Image (spheres, rainbow, N blue to C red):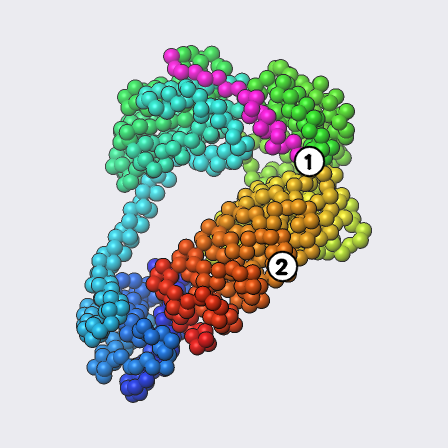
């Protein structure tokens, strides 16, 4: 139990007590009893508010934190106080005559019930007060001491109230539910203790698993699979050999391939396929590892075997006893398990599964010193022979490895023509804009690259990159005829890359080569901080000079380092660059007012890394406290043109049309036109509509068109432009909502008139059965409601929950709309929805007294 959850509980009880006091004030009769109970509840509120302040400030491990823990949970003071208030609320809640409830509610308690209620609240209040005055141990003793008696008295109180509520079945049911809840609280307490016990067990298991020293390949798997072009590798998954390997036990699928064929990417695809396929089957185990020549010291045979053991062991709950025993046998001696010990335990754990799949990438990079590779493969084949394990392995063509798999099913890995075409299609937008405007040239590029790579996928990327700087179709075609092929293709491709580096000014060239040297020679990937320190080392100096540390800005710059990869990294960027957030959200507004845009702005949006970083800072939103991963929730594949459209910078958009595809979609499926339409920048919308190849009615991943976005935000001028372009005025998105529906929800009367003039369906229903009238009524847009009613829409239409426009208007207290609907023919004031509730009940629940009297 943490202070945050306690604060939430206190707030909930305070809200409940506030509601109860309102009902007490509104009731009639028994003035003295009402006043006494009200004063006691207010006294409890005062204590709760003080307690809330302490809970807000309490840190884990402090005395206050321990006190707060003693107050909340099953069978604790806060729980019982909340129960007592719920019992009062159950009796005070209005009955069926909702329209008269506020004026005629009679006091439902007799004097004895009030006495017992006050007594119950005082007992819990005294314990809460004790928390603010006494030591923690005394508080805990008192809570335990009074727990049984307070619980019995509370149950007796609610039983009494329940017995007197038999004339109203609703009250009887609620009170009975409360009573049963108290009776089960002891069970809840046991469950809570069980949860603590489970947490302890989980911690112990995590300690044991962490003791097995292995490289965590999960981040590498995620990184590799994220680089996969969607759809690639499907040929492997669909192949008869892979399907046979999946279906039958004790099978080995060996996939050799030439360097750069895409073996590692395909391995990650296989891992993802297995994980997804058997995600819900706990009797099937999947383990994998990636050999890497740079990590050979950490990839000895026992390390790799230990990694497989760890992956399979953590898939079992509880942790297999033999793994716990292995840990205990070495814990006190502080020793590590031998290869034979790991082998024995691995076999025992594998035996717990009905099937086991093991995936190994790049066996050719597994070290051979001390017979490591032979030892590892022998162990894997032994595991297969004893327990029917399925093995998938990739490697370059190494005679010794090929010989060991001579009796296995073999499937050569080569870059398929379709995969290469798919990759080139997805990345051809990186080439100069004249390529994007020339479909014939695009086909030539596709064909030329496919022909040149001869099964080497990596070459496709290198060859495509080599065309980026070409200035004309003729230059591109000339380069295509000279694309290197054969065994020396990689040498030529990397020589071209080095030529581009060496074409920079001398200092930049030197820094780039130093960075490349460290990245190439490092035994593992370096962080930016590590790379900074490495570059700052000065021969002859005893320690690092901070003034010699090259800044990230000099290596890449804050923006050029691209988007941040975690919440912490993103927040640190914001902390260390105070202007960063402002600049990201406002640079476009400044640029829009600048008649003569500087070259700096053009250059800035020409950098993909800078655009990525800017886009992240602009688009991410932290929706709630503790929102984990929020920094990664933003659209990818945003171009400079998308951003120019987002901010409505017309001159910049016109300039970027020459280098960015005018209709490119970001990862949300949105085009520059979509963003400009949402933001209402008429000039940019007009510019984009005039551009060649722009689809005015393009749908994003949510099925929404530029018209839909413009209608939602009330941009009348943009809506006119799009309608004049002949877009579909009544297009439905994936939620079944039309532009009219979005405009109605947000009260844009002028846009509504434009759309209705196009003949759209005024009464269309979305996937939840809601009409434009329903949305307008919920949000209180009287003028829009009038307009729709004049169109003859069904005024009392029910959505999938049985709710009418009147129901939504009443719940939200929109008095004018309620009156308007009540005077409309066909509207039933007492229409019941799927929860058997009438509009008036929603108004009463939310305290909208005026709506009640309409």
Q: Height in image: 297 above or below 114?
A: above
Q: Is residue 233 magenta?
A: no
Q: Height in image: 273 above or below 179?
A: above
Viewer-side label of 1, 2 = 2
Residue 783 lies, in percent from the top left, at 58, 67
Magenta residues, start to end: 407-430
- In terms of depth relative to the viewer, which is nearer, 606 or 387? 606
Q: CA distance from mark 1 to mark 2?
A: 62 Å
Q: Is residue 240 visible?
A: yes
> Is disc 1 in contact with disc 2, using a CB cutoff of under 8 Å?
no
Q: Residue beneath label 2, please?
A: 753
Q: Residue at x 73, y 51 (%)?
A: 683
Dot placed on the residue nearer the N-terminal end, 1 or 2: 1
Crowd tier of the residue under label 2, counting other residues whose Cα lies within 10 Å: few below 14, some 14–19, many 20 or above: some
Q: Is residue 418 magenta?
A: yes
Q: Residue at x 37, y 64 (%)?
A: 832
Q: Residue at x 45, y 62 (%)?
A: 796
Label 1 secondary element: helix
Residue 333 lies, in percent from the top left, at 30, 37
Q: Is residue 43 visible?
A: no
| The disc label shown at residue 83, or none | none
Residue 42 relative to residue 156: left or right: right
Q: How many marks?
A: 2
Q: Residue beneath label 1, please?
A: 511
């Amino acid at each position: 139990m943490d202070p945050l959850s306690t604060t939430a509980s206190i707030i909930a009880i305070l809200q409940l007590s506030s509601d109860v006091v309102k009902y007490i004030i509104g009731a009639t009769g028994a003035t003295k009893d009402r006043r006494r109970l009200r004063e006691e509840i207010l006294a409890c509120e005062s204590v709760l508010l003080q307690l809330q302040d302490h809970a807000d400030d309490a840190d884990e491990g402090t005395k206050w934190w321990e006190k707060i823990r003693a107050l909340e949970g099953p069978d604790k003071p806060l729980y019982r106080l909340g129960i007592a208030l719920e019992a009062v609320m159950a009796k005070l809640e209005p009955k069926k005559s909702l329209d008269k409830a506020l004026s005629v509610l009679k006091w439902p308690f007799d004097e004895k019930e009030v006495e017992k209620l006050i007594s119950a609240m005082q007992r819990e209040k005294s314990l809460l007060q004790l928390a603010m005055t006494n030591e923690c141990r005394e508080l805990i003793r008192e809570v335990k001491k009074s727990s049984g008696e307070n619980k019995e008295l509370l149950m007796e109180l609610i039983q009494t109230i329940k017995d007197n509520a038999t004339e109203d079945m609703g009250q009887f049911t609620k009170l009975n539910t409360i009573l049963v809840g108290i009776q089960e609280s002891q069970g809840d307490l046991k469950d809570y203790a069980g949860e603590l016990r489970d947490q302890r067990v989980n911690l112990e298991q995590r300690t044991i698993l962490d003791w097995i020293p292995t490289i965590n390949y999960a981040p590498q798997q995620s990184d590799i699979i994220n680089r996969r072009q969607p759809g690639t590798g499907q040929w492997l998954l669909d192949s008869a050999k892979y399907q046979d390997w999946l279906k039958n036990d004790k099978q080995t699928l060996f996939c050799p391939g030439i360097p750069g064929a895409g073996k590692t990417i395909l391995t990650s695809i296989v891992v993802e396929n297995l994980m997804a396929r058997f995600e819900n089957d706990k009797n099937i185990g999947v383990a994998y590892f990636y050999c890497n020549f740079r990590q050979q010291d950490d990839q000895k045979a026992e390390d790799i075997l230990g990694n497989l053991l760890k992956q399979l062991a953590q898939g079992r709950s509880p942790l297999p006893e033999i793994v716990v025993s292995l840990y205990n046998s070495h814990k006190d001696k502080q020793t590590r398990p031998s290869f034979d010990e790991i082998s024995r335990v691995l076999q025992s754990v594998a035996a717990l599964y009905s099937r086991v799949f093991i995936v190994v990438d790049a066996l050719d990079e597994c070290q051979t010193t001390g017979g490591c590779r032979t030892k590892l493969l022998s162990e894997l084949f032994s595991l297969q022979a004893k327990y029917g394990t399925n093995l998938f392995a990739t490697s370059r063509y190494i005679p010794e490895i090929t010989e060991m798999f001579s009796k296995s099913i073999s499937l050569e890995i080569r870059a398929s023509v379709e995969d290469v075409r798919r990759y080139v299609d997805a990345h051809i937008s990186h080439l100069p804009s004249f390529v994007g405007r020339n479909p014939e040239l695009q086909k030539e590029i596709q064909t030329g690259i496919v022909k040149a790579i001869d099964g080497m996928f990596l070459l496709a990327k290198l060859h495509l990159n080599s065309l980026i700087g070409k200035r004309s179709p003729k230059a591109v075609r000339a380069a295509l005829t000279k694309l290197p092929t054969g065994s020396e293709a990689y040498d030529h491709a990397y020589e071209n890359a080095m030529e581009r580096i060496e074409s920079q000014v001398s200092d930049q060239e030197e820094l780039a080569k130093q960075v490349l040297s460290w990245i190439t020679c490092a035994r593992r990937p370096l962080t930016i901080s590590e790379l900074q320190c490495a570059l700052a080392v000065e021969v002859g100096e005893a320690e690092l000079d901070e003034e010699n540390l090259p800044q990230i800005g000099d290596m890449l710059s804050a923006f050029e380092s691209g988007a941040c990869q975690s919440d912490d990294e993103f927040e640190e960027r914001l902390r260390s660059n105070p202007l960063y957030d402002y600049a990201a959200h406002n640079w476009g507004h400044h640029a829009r007012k600048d008649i003569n845009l500087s070259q700096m702005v053009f250059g800035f949006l020409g950098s993909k890394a800078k655009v990525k970083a800017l886009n992240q800072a602009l688009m991410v939103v932290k929706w709630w406290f503790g929102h984990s991963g929020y920094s990664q929730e933003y659209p990818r594949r945003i171009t400079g043109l998308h951003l120019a459209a987002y901010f409505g910078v017309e001159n910049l958009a016109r300039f970027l049309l020459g280098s960015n595809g005018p209709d490119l979609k970001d990862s949300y499926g949105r085009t520059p036109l979509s963003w400009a339409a949402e933001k209402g920048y008429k000039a940019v919308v007009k510019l984009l509509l005039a551009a060649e190849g722009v689809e005015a009615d393009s749908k994003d991943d949510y099925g929404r068109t530029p018209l839909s976005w413009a209608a939602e935000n009330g941009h009348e001028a943009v809506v006119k432009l799009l309608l004049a372009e002949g877009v579909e005025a009544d297009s439905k998105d994936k939620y079944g909502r039309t532009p009219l529906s979005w405009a109605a929800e947000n009260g844009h009367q002028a846009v509504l008139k434009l759309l209705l003039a196009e003949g759209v369906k005024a009464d269309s229903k979305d996937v939840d059965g809601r009409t434009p009238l329903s949305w307008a009524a919920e949000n209180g847009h009287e003028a829009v409601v009038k307009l729709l009613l004049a169109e003859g829409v069904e005024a009392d239409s029910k959505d999938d929950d049985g709710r009418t426009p009147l129901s939504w208007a009443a719940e939200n207290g929109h008095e004018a709309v309620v009156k308007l609907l009540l005077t409309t023919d066909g509207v039933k004031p007492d229409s019941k929805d799927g929860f058997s509730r009438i509009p008036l009940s929603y108004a009463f629940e939310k305290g909208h007294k005026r709506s009640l009297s309409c």
